[in-house]
Image: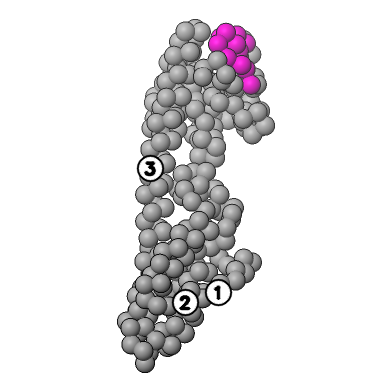
Amino acid sequence: MAESLRILVAHEKPSMLRHLHEAVAQQWQVAADCETIRAVREAVMDRRPDVLVTGTSFPDGDGVEMVVELGRERPLPAVIVASDGSLQQVVQAMQDHVMAYLTEPVTPDTLKAAVVVARVRFEQLRELEEEVGSLRQALADRKVIERAKGIIMAAERLSEDEATHDEAQATFAKWYVRTMNIFGRPGSPRNQRYRELRLKVRDNDEVRQAFATEIAGLCEKFGLAVPAWTPRWGELPEEAHIPG
């Protein structure tokens, strides 16, 4: 896997930038060489590198802060190349998004080790975030679904009596349509962003269909008909929303 990595190299000093380029080129492909934070940001978006190797200070800003910000915008394994004087700042940043660091001078062997560590830590973090995101998704989904299921459970009590069965069906039909509308729009930009950040793992419509399947089973059990639901996507909230 290492042989196919594309590494973005950034440093404020041209001589150090060349040195890092040469060290990276011995093992992997250099995605781009950058001497400014602006250039790094553009290269991250355009080149989509696998790893960022960067210095700590640039003419247009702080390299460590840049890595932390990039980690929030587009998670990326990073190796900070630091001098002794900036180590404290780097250590603090490692609590956030920086995955590994090196102190100058850098050799091909120490760089290779740091990149491997950064990749391993990054994957561990992604797995943890996915687990947390799955839990958050499950809790959010259950909140919506349980609230909605309460409606059909109330209808069940009415449906058991022939005298109130039609009333139960009418009440259920009214609230089923409203409930199907609370899950939000499919493919919403906000949902996509949540999924990129591992805050959610399913699209809004996937949750809606899971609810519909569960309710269909209950309807069959209680002798109720599932009402027709025609989505009006433009009128739905972007994300799941329970009124009241």
- Residue 7, compared with residue 218, is above or below; it is above
Question: Which range is magenta?
Answer: 16-31
Q: Secondary structure at mark 3?
A: helix
Answer with left or right where residue 200 lies relative to residue 29: left
Asked if the residue at tag 2 contacts the one at tag 3, i.e. Cβ–Cβ closer than 8 Å, the answer is no
Crowd band around label 1 with a 10 angstrom C-alpha radius: few (<14), some (14–19), many (20+): few
Q: Nearer the viewer, residue 126 or 36?
A: 126
Residue corresponding to mark 1: 228
Residue corresponding to mark 3: 131
Instruction: State yes or no: residue 22 in magenta.
Output: yes
Q: Secondary structure at mark 2?
A: loop
Q: CA distance from mark 1 to mark 2?
A: 9 Å
Give the quarter of the image for residue 172. bottom left
Q: Nearer the viewer, residue 176 or 218?
A: 218
Question: Residue 82: where, in percent of width, then height?
Answer: 47, 18
Q: Amino acid at mark 3?
A: Glu
Mark sitting on residue 225? 2
- Residue 63, compared with residue 4, is above or below; it is below
Query: Can you tell which of label 1 and label 2 is closer to the viewer?
Result: 2
Q: Amino acid at mark 1?
A: Ala
Write the residue at 44% across / 29% down.
Answer: 122
Q: Secondary structure at mark 1?
A: loop
Give the quarter of the image for residue 242. bottom left
Q: Is residue 12 visible?
A: no
Question: Residue 69: where, in percent of width, then height?
Answer: 52, 37
Mark sitting on residue 35? none
Query: Can you tell which of label 3 and label 1 is closer to the viewer?
Result: 1
Write the residue at 40% across / 47% down.
Answer: 134
Question: Residue 211: where, in percent of width, then height?
Answer: 44, 63
Question: Residue 71: where, in percent of width, then height?
Answer: 50, 35
Query: Can you tell which of label 3 and label 2 is closer to the viewer?
Result: 2
